[in-house]
Every structure is written in structure tokens, then in C-alpha cells.
Amino acid sequence: MIGEQIEELNRLKGEAQLDSNRQFIQNEINRLSLVKLNHEKELTKLTSDGGKSEQLGVITVTNYMWDQSNEHIKIYIELDKTDKIDKDEIRLEFLSDTKFTCIFGKYRFTLGRLFKPLDKAKSKAIISKSNKLVITLHKAKSEHWSSLQSTTDTTPKFTDDKNDIDSGDPEKSLMNIMKKMYDEGDDEMKRTIAKSWYESRNKQGMPDLP
């Protein structure tokens, strides 16, 4: 788990002798803490309705169409003819000015990392007469967007190999982090990591550092 990785890195930080090494480790602790915080926020958001969504079996929607004017973005989602969704069953919630979730009936649609910020107060979602969900997102600034979503990830990174570090296996992820730090660190950093890894391996049966 991410919490265990942070604890391990904090232990390494305590053993490091040089300020540069401690800062080196702190950068990764900060990144993992941000990832952990974002995960917790998402979990809180999903459970804020008292578990009703899970009980109803919320269906995630991924198919949609969109167009734009200089003032707004419009997103269209086709509904089945048998779906009868009342306006009281539609909730448009903003996680930030570039990320939103729309819950409508038993469905959920989420988009993040939008190209530019939105005017949340003016944005809305309705069901059209042709039984489509129409989400109107007003742009914070009147302009043409070259795309709906940004291809730039603004999440702070310790290295460019984030996908290798954030694997689904916590033990493998921690090993990748420490290997990166070992490869990029100075002699003092290498000694600190080697000592910590040796102790962890003996206690937990972990593999040798590659």
C-alpha cells in the first residue's frame, strides 16, 4: 500500500546523512502523499451518498460525443429508450475546475484533466426530449479549445518512469522506487538504501535489490 511505502521512505530519510539525500527522498514522499490524498478524496466522493450508488449498481459510461462554441462545451450521451430518468436524478458535481462527475439515474460519467478551467456555476446537465443526456460546460474564458482534455499531466513526479513505480503490486512498486533512488543517488545514498534493503529483506523475506 502507498502508506507502507511512505513509512519505508520516512525510515530511509531518517537514516540519510546528507541534506541532498534527505531532500531526494522527501520529494518522493511528497509525490506519494499527493497520490494517497487524491485516492482518499475519490473514495470519499464515491461513498458520500451513504453507499446508495453501490447498492443500486452504478454503471460507468464511457461513450459520448461532444462539440463546442467559444463559450461552452456540450457533451451528449445516448440513453436507451427504456431509460426514464427524472431531472431530480441528475447530479453534476465538480471535483475541480477541470474535472467533473455527472450521476444520472443508475449511470455515472466522469471526465478529468479538461483542456481549460470551467465556470462551474453556469454548467448544467439535462435530459433532452430525444432522451439524451446533455451536459453543458461553460468555459471560464471564451476561446476555442484544441481538444477536450489536456494531454499534460500536472501531477508532481519524482521520475519520468511513474508507471513503473505506480504498479499494482505495492512490494514491486517500493522496490522500483528504491532502485531508482539507488541508481540516481550518490555513494552515501547507495549505502543507506543498501543497508535498509538488507534489513528489510532479512525481516520480510524480500528479494535482493536488482
Image (spheres, grey):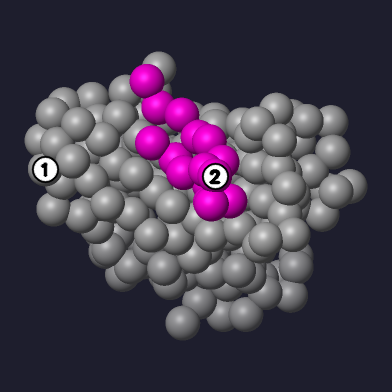
Q: Give the range drawn in magenta.
A: 122-136
Badge number at residue 128: none
| Residue for point 53% across, 59% down | 78
Q: Which amino acid does label 1 sit on?
A: His
The vertical placement of 208 against 155, above or below, is below
Q: What residue type is labelled 2?
A: Lys
Badge number at residue 129: 2
The N terminus lies in which quarter of the figure?
A: bottom right
| Residue for point 76% across, 36% down | 47
**Picture mark count:** 2
Q: Residues within 10 Å of mark 2 (few under 14, many from 20)?
A: few
The vertical placement of 199 against 86, above or below, is below
| Residue 87 falls in image quadrant | top right
The image shows residue 152 at horizontal and vertical percentages of 23, 53
Badge number at residue 144: 1
- Would you say residue 130 sits in the magenta stretch? yes
Q: What secondary structure is the stretch in magenta mostly built from?
A: strand
110 left or right of 148 in image: right
The image shows residue 206 at horizontal and vertical percentages of 67, 74
